[in-house]
Amino acid sequence: MLTPRTATRLQGIPPTIFTRMSALAQRTGSVNLGQGYPDVDGPPSVVERAVEALRGGANQYAPAPGVPELRQAIARHQQRHYGLEPDPDSEVVVTTGATEGIAAALLGLVDPGDEVVVLEPYYDSYLAMIQMAGGVRRPVTLRAPDYRLDVDELRAAVGPRTRVLLLNTPHNPTGTVLTREELAAVAEVAVEHDLVVITDEVYEHLTYGHEHVPLATLPGMWERTLTLSSAGKSWSFTGWKVGWASGPPPLVQALLSAKQWLTFTSGSPLQPAVAHALDEESAWPGELARELEQRRDLLCTGLAEAGMEVRVPEGTYFALTDVSSYGWEDGTAFCLALPERAGVVAIPAQAFHDDAEAGRHLVRWAFCKQPGVIEEGLDRLRRADLRA
């Protein structure tokens, strides 16, 4: 049962817009270009490895930090791609998706009253978990049309009670991939103010002509950075909810101390399968990214032809558009009308903003769908009257 204190912290956290819009898509038979999950599974060999683990008896609790096989594979992944060498026994922990990793990191590192600087627009669980930890969020807005980091605004957001900087790159929902120069500025602020940085890098392999640089690779940042990722996006197994965190032992232990009261451990038979994905299917995310780049271009071209101002994303599998030209009061009204008007579902970006004006007319579209699905959605948009 919720205690009065916890219930008070939860007040004001809106129900997830994704659940609402996906239910609307199902009810109206709409093409769902809103919620970000692929419509094709990842590598068959990874599925077979999970079946082997199920049949081989890997069906009881895994160790709380994760099975050694997966922790070792994560360490190899970090070394292979970024030159980082985390100790799999003390500097890696497996989580139930990156969402739990974010939750456990914030609960383990943020005390009531601590301030958390976060890039806005932000993934919706950030808001909920900062509030549940008793923290105070300090947003730094990536603004249209370029959605770049304003370093002066970042510096202004940091105060004497700031403890954590929560960074997401490649960034959902803007599609921005922070440059090495932008990350160097973040690192300078973090060192100057002795901040812990939690980095959400779940789209690390899904970039399009832009280099993803983990903040932990910059000078002075390994010892203060907790890096989160998962297999869900890069290997198209979003329903498995297997993620990980790596970083220095004190930060990993802080996350683990909270995780033990959340899930305690994560799906035992799925962990060997994800280890197989990291080691034996390491080329798969690159192939996926090449396919997604084509789908991105298909979607963005079609949305622009429909009369929307489109930002072509540098990474992730989402694109933002400005729909103000249609005359709607805001993006939420547009998205709620869209299923009936056009038989298509999208997500209003107001759900990711504190700054109501910055996100008022922005709408997020997902291009992690098969080309035929995207084309059907675009065809429906072309034939619809989208004016208010």
Image (cartoon, helix red, strand yellow):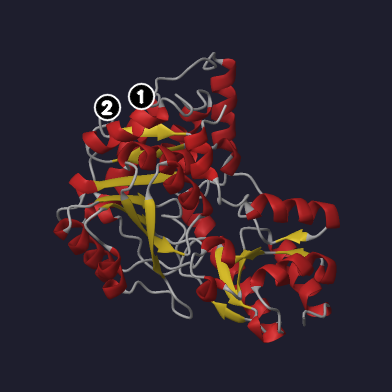
Per the rendering, the mark at residue 16 is none
Q: Quadrant of residue 43?
A: top right
**Is residue 83 at least partly visible in the picture?**
yes
Question: Residue 324 appears at what percent x and percent y?
Answer: 64, 82
Proximity of marks 1 and 2: CB atoms separated by less than 8 Å: yes
Name the residue nearer the viewer: 138 or 41.
138
Instruction: Tell me how far mark 1 sits from mark 2, CA to CA.
Output: 8 Å
Q: Residue furthest front?
A: 4
Tell which circle, 1 or 2, labels the residue nearer the N-terminal end: 1
State whether residue 185 is above or below residue 165.
Answer: below
| Residue drawn at 50 percent across, 31 percent down | 273
| Three-letter code, disc 1 | Pro
Helix, strand or loop at disc 2? loop
Q: Quadrant of the C terminus?
A: bottom right
The residue drawn where x is 31% and y is 59% is 213
- Residue under label 2: 89
Name the spot of residue 127 as percent of width and height, x first: 48, 52
The numbered dot on residue 68 is 1
Q: Going 50% across and 47% down the picture, which residue do you hit?
A: 128
Q: Is residue 318 shown left or right of residue 111?
A: right
Question: In the figure, is residue 274 to the left or right of 325?
Answer: left
Quadrant containing the N terminus is top right
Which amino acid type is marked by label 2? Asp
Front in this rendered view, residue 288 or 387: 387
Few, some or many residues within 10 Å of mark 2 (<14, 14–19, 20+) = some
| Picture layout, residue 17 above or below residue 306 | above
* Res 39 visible: no
- Mark 1 burial class by Cα count in 10 Å: few <14, some 14-19, many 20+: some
Which percent across, then down, holds residue 337? 78, 69
Q: Residue at x 35, y 65 (%)?
A: 211
